[in-house]
Amino acid sequence: MKTPGLLMSGVVISLVTLAAAAEEPTEKRQLLAKHETLAVFDGLKFRLCMGRTALCPERCGDSGEFATFTVKKSLKYEKHGQYGDPKQENFLVQVSDYDKNPKGDPKILETVKGLKKGDYVLLSWHHDYVTKEGVSSPERPIVKLEKIDSDKAKELLKAPAAKEGDEAPMKETTIEITTKKPADKIKMTTIDKDTATLDVSSQSGIGGATVTLAKGKWPKTIVLRLHLSGLESFAVSNGKIKLTGSVLCHSGNTKRLYLTEIGKEEEREPGTEIKVLDSAGRPVKGLPGKGGYFEITLPKTLLEGESKSLELGWIDFYRG
């Protein structure tokens, strides 16, 4: 079997620290606190930014519709740093900009769209301290938003409440990401301590990256999302095992996926698939279209053993 050749550089991933740059990491993410809660949806409210910049309030990005939640119970709380947020009574999720254009994770937006006032949800988020290009600021990414029925909510309300310090801080894992081209970006989102998602954006459509495990252990699951209009070729290698695949831009958009041991011809069962999703995270036929992406859950064999780095490469369309 002949697979497309790719020119790639190394990739490094971290649950707590994320970096993406040509020479050295330009983004670092430090986990300060984790919140897992039972909350109630209070509805949508339009809020204007109170800043005084030239872009406020219309174009600063901080005005728009917000989904509002009241926390009924803290299910789990971990404080990892001196400045981590304490337990919260309310939480806001921005779902649109000033002009009411959708804003945020498509899957979160889809969940909010299906909520009614008074619905119970499992709501979890992190308090991160993020440094990008020398500028530091807090971020509070949502890692879970799930509607539940009232019976399950009542059971959770009756259970013993979580106390600060009940859970030992998660063992720190540090992953660093270096892209081959400065214009390429890889954003890592930690869904929980066992799952991480890598969102790849590539201006030229051809690129590569190295994900390096600098400290700790690999997450049990890594999900790769390639925000490309086509996928003529991609590959992920740990130096011993290599996953390669493609989605043809012709002939019915045939999907191909291979898992091989480097230096050997026989193939292994990939144990995964290439999903084609639209901007809202819904499956589509053919290619993903504007705002869509290709999603692959990496085989666990790539994360096993003593390998400390992954090499990524991708090509959206071959150039003649």
Image (cartoon, rainbow, N blue to C red):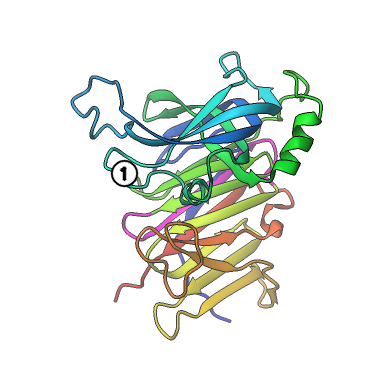
**Residue at the spot x=65%, y=66% of the render?**
272
Q: Is residue 236 left or right of residue 43?
A: right
Query: Which segment is the magenta one?
Result: 202-219
Disc 1 target residue: 100
Please provide percent x and percent y for residue 70: 57, 28
Camera-side residue: 268 or 85? 85
Residue 203: within the magenta?
yes
At a point 64% along the width and 21% down the height, the residue shown is: 80
Residue 269 % position (x, y): 70, 72
Q: Residue furthest left?
A: 54
Q: How many marks?
A: 1
For the C terminus, give its image quadrant.
Answer: bottom left
Q: Locate the N terminus and report the quarter of the image it occupies.
A: bottom right
Q: Please provide percent x and percent y for residue 285.
A: 47, 74
The image quarter containing residue 126 is top right
Q: Position of residue 30 (x, y in %)?
A: 55, 27
Q: Residues within 10 Å of mark 1 (few under 14, many from 20)?
A: few
Task: Answer left or right for 129 relative to 88.
Answer: left
Q: Foreground residue, 7 or 227?
A: 227
**28 w.r.t. 186: above or below:** above
Q: Quadrant of residue 170?
A: top right
Residue 317 is covered by the magenta coloring: no
Nearest to the observer: residue 25 or residue 148: 148
Q: Residue at x 81, y 30 (%)?
A: 159
